[in-house]
Image (cartoon, rainbow, N blue to C red):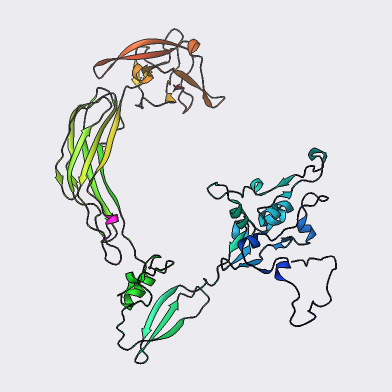
Amino acid sequence: MANPVGINSYVTNFFSPSNLHLGVTHSVNNIGGYQEFATIAERNAIPTTPNSASAQPYNGFTLNDDKWSSGRRRVGMLAFVMETQKLYTLQPVGYFGNGGLTEVDWNAAPEWERAVRIDPSGVFSSEANSPTNNFNNPLVTSGASDLGIDVDAEGVTLTALELANSCWVELVMGIDGNPITNVQYGVPSAGDLTITLTHDGTGSGAAITFTVALPTGYDGIYDPVVADATVVPTDVGGIDSGTTAGDLSGLSMNQMWDKLLFPTVYPSGQGANTYINDIPNYTYKVVGETVSFTLESTASQGTLSNPAGPWAGPINAALIEDISAAGASTGPFNPAITPPTGIADVPMNGYVVALGINRWRLTTSFDQGVMPQDSTGADYSNARFNAQDKMNTTDFEGVYPIKLGASSGNGNFVNRGLVSHGANDIECSQDYLEVDGGVRHRIAISDAMIAGRSVMIQQWSPTALAYVDLTMSSEWTQSPVPFNIEGNSINYTLFTKSSLPGGGDVGNDELYRIKF
């Protein structure tokens, strides 16, 4: 680090007092270093170099000949405050131990920004003199709000004191050590107890051995010297803050060490649920089609960590209800159950598919689960599964097929593969050449699927390598046509190609695409 050079340059050798009972400097007059203050307010009043009327933008760090300091504030300085009995270090807001920015970022920051980050209550000249700012008249300044450091993590504006404090980080000392991994006891002589603490080697200390003199007749039971109402101020191992001396009184030394070294582990449960499927797992079926399938139901009690085993109790009832969009036409069913999790299948023979979602809901009732226990063996009711119902559904959609023209004649059609009535961008094949005055390309869509929406039939462009819109009024004619679907007359809208005849599908790309 470069040595800052002041007006008088270097001192020959060093300063010394004229009398040994005198000092050389007062710490509060130092730039950085260690300083002492009676109050937080006095610490927060440590000055930075003020704005200069003749030098813009701010140049306090240049005047100190030190990128880390301005006025008497210096990054990393220590300040002890007597009213709090705490030691603080000056860390720029957002940097080092007070954020994630680094020295590289610090070097790139303008001096006014550095000043704000070590003195957040101040505002500092941030623009050079120029005609656009009337040569800094009035003086253009920037502060914490311009850097976004005047609010907390939730976006709440800091108070004046909170803002002034934000560059000071409390320095906590004496917490680095070795995690204790083993405790050994010995009795080297009557009335003495030797305790040896060993560690895992990740810290910097050695194993600790100390001897405790035991009072005559000591029985190894904790008998607090402090009042029973005295509370533990912070968490210590498995002893939580707020625990009173009275709570610990009467524990054996083994129990005390176990609580210190092995915090209580609480049990957890998960995975209790129920499931239903329509086998063979239909996705789409034609409206009016008669089908047969099986409603298969299962249940799971989940798992509990302690005692290891099922979380939920056995099932005690199951109910299957038809909640199809068109209204219930089957059930309800009460399949036989075989605790703890068995649910009988429900055959669905001769079912007539309805338009829209055909859906069934399974409700399975579970008994209360066993009482969980924590690592000490104590009951822990917060993790217990309470008696309750779990639900699950299965469904498929009843649809009308899209009809595609066949090459054998304008009155002949084939069914396209079934898709949802809510589908879009549906590709359609017409793999034959049209004949002028003869067979044309045709697509028929049920009115139930169109459902009042406008229809655009796009055509594959081998030039654009994409589907492009056609002018529907000149490319296609529309006409209402009924089709026999599963013995029922269903209204369709037929789209017939009316422009010049063309070819069929291009390679592996289907010629047309329906877009609603």
Give coordinates of residue 150: x percent, y percent: 61, 49
| Dominant secondary-structure state across the stretch colored magenta | loop
Tell whether position 383 is magenta: yes
Q: Nearer the viewer, residue 507 or 265?
A: 265
Q: Horizontal placement of 138 versus 433: left or right? A: right
Q: Quadrant of residue 236?
A: bottom left
Give coordinates of residue 153: x percent, y percent: 54, 50
Q: Nearer the viewer, residue 13 or 514?
A: 13
Tell whether position 460 is magenta: no
Up-down relation of residue 443 to residue 15 (above or below): above
Up-down relation of residue 17 to residue 459 (above or below): below
Q: Quadrant of residue 249?
A: bottom left
Residue 79 in view: yes
Give coordinates of residue 280: x percent, y percent: 25, 36
Q: Residue at x 48, y 75 (%)?
A: 201
Q: Nearer the viewer, residue 449 or 152?
A: 152
Residue 405 in view: no
Q: Nearer the viewer, residue 315 or 107?
A: 107
Q: Quadrant of the C terminus?
A: top left
Kindly give the residue lying farthest to the top in the view shown: 437
Q: Horizontal placement of 64 versus 337: left or right? A: right
Kindly give the residue lying farthest to the bottom in the view shown: 189
Q: Residue at x 45, y 76 (%)?
A: 199
Up-down relation of residue 357 to residue 161 (above or below): above
Q: Magenta region: which residues?
A: 374-384
Q: Horizontal placement of 478 versus 147: left or right? A: left
Q: Quadrant of the N terminus?
A: bottom right
Give coordinates of residue 510: x percent, y percent: 45, 25
Q: Number of numbered discs present? A: 0
Q: Horizontal placement of 234 versus 338: left or right? A: right
Q: Residue at x 22, y 48 (%)?
A: 387
